[in-house]
Amino acid sequence: MQRRPRRNRQSAAIRSLAQETHVTANDLILPLFLLEGTNQKSEVASMPGIFRLSLDLMLKEIESCLKLGIKAFDVFPVVEETYKDQMATRSYDENFFYLQALTTIKREFPEALIITDVAMDPYSSDGHDGIVRDGEIINDETLDVLGKMALAQAATGIDMIGPSDMMDGRVGYLRDILDDAGYSQVGIMSYTAKYASAFYGPFRDALDSAPKFGDKKTYQMNPANRSEALIEAELDYIEGADVLMVKPALAYLDIIADLKANYDLPIAAYNVSGEYAMIKAAGEKGWLDADRARDESLMAIKRAGADMILTYFAKEYLADRQV
Ligand code: PBG
C-alpha cells in the first residue's frame, strides 16, 4: 500500500495539523429573545438553557458573551398579545420597548454587531410575516410595513437588518429606503433561502409567534427545492444584500454549499431552534452526547460553506473552550 490515509489520523498532533475546518468565535452569531420590563427572565421550555431576558439582564448577557469572544447578536422581541394587530404597527413605534432597547444596547456596546429581525410575525395578530387579507399574504403592501420597521430599527443605531419574511422584492425595497434615509451603512443579512420548516417550532414557542391559521408555505420555500435557492440568491444579490442566509442549516447543507459555490458574498447559516432542541432533548435522555453532537453540527455547517453561523449554542460552545 502506497497510500495509508490513517497515518494522518494516528495522533492528536497530526489530526489537529491536518484539520481542515475550525469553528471559532469569529464564526458565531448569538440570537437573543428580548422581554419587556426589568428583571424578567424565563426559560424557553423547548430550548433548555435559553432564556428570554429583559433589557437589564440582556445587557449583562451580552457583556459576558463579548468576553467569550462573541461579536454579533441577533435580537428578537417577545411581544405581548395585547400589542399585536393586523398591521404590526408596534414594529415601527419608536416608543416600543424593542426599539428603545436596541438604542440602549448599541449605546452600551458600540463594538458589538447588532442585527435586527425584519418581519411582521412577532407583532402580527395573525402570526404571519406579511399582511393577511381574506386568508392571503399580500406581498407588495407588506413591503411598506417592512420599510417602516427597517427605518425605525436603523434609527436606533443597529448595524444590520435581517429580513426574515420572504416577501418578494424586499431586499431591494429595503436597500432603497435605507439609502434614501441616509442609512447606507446599515447592512442587510437576507434570509435568502428560508424554508417552510418544522424546525422553527421552539422559536415560535419562545416568541409566541405561531401563525394563527394556516402555514407559511406561500412565502417560505418548499424543502424539496434546491435550484430555487439560486433564484432567491440571484435576486438578493442583485437587490443589494450583504450576506446571504440559508435557514435551517443541518438539513440544508447542500443549499449552503450551492450558495457558497455560486456567490462571493459571505454565506450565513441559521442553526435554528428545532436543531438546538433536538440535540438537547436527546442529550437529556442520555441517547447521545449532546456536546459532541453540538460541536459536530457546527463543524458540518462551517464545512459545508457557511462563513457565519447563527446558533443558540454559541455561548456554551465557546464557554466549553475556555481554559
Ligand atoms: C420569523 C422568524 C422565524 C425564525 C426567525 N425569524 C420563524 C418563522 O419563520 O416562523 C426562526 C428561528 C429559529 O427557529 O430558531 N420571521
Image: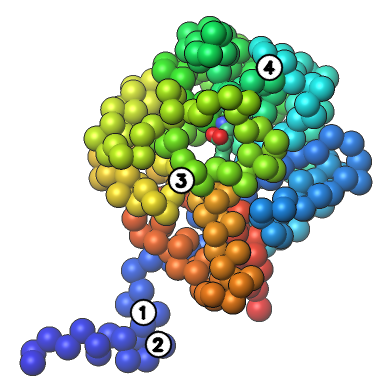
Q: Residue at x 77, y 53 (%)?
A: 43
User: From mark 3 to mark 1, how far is it between C-alphas?
Assistant: 31 Å
Residue at disc 4, secondary structure: loop
Mark earlier in primary sequence (2, 4): 2
* Residue 8 versus residue 59 in the image, above or below: below
Q: Nearer the viewer, residue 204 or 242?
A: 204
How many neighbours does mark 2 have within 10 angstroms: few (below 14), some (14-19), or many (20 or more)? few
Give the x, y percent position of residue 276.
Answer: 57, 57
Element under disc 2: helix
Towards the viewer: 250 or 14: 250
Which one is in front in this view, the residue at disc 3 or the one at disc 1? Answer: 3
Q: Where is residue 320 in the image (x, y as percent from the top left)?
A: 63, 72
Mark 2 → mark 3, Cα distance in angstroms = 34 Å
Answer with mark 3 or mark 4, whichever residue precedes in sequence. Answer: 4
Which of pointers 3 and 1 lies earlier in the amino acid sequence? 1
Seen in the picture, residue 217 relative to 73 is either above or below; the reply is above
**Residue flagged by tag 3: what amino acid is it?**
Pro
**Residue, disc 1:** 17
**Residue 6: x, y in percent?**
24, 88
> As drawn, is 306 to the left or to the right of 126?
left
Quadrant observed for ligand 1 in the rendered image:
top right
Q: How far apart are marks 3 and 4 (CA)?
A: 25 Å
Pointer 2 residue? 13
Q: What residue type is labelled 1?
A: Leu
- Quadrant assignment for the N terminus: bottom left
Evaluate if marks 1 and 2 touch, with contact meaning CB atoms under 8 Å apart.
Answer: yes
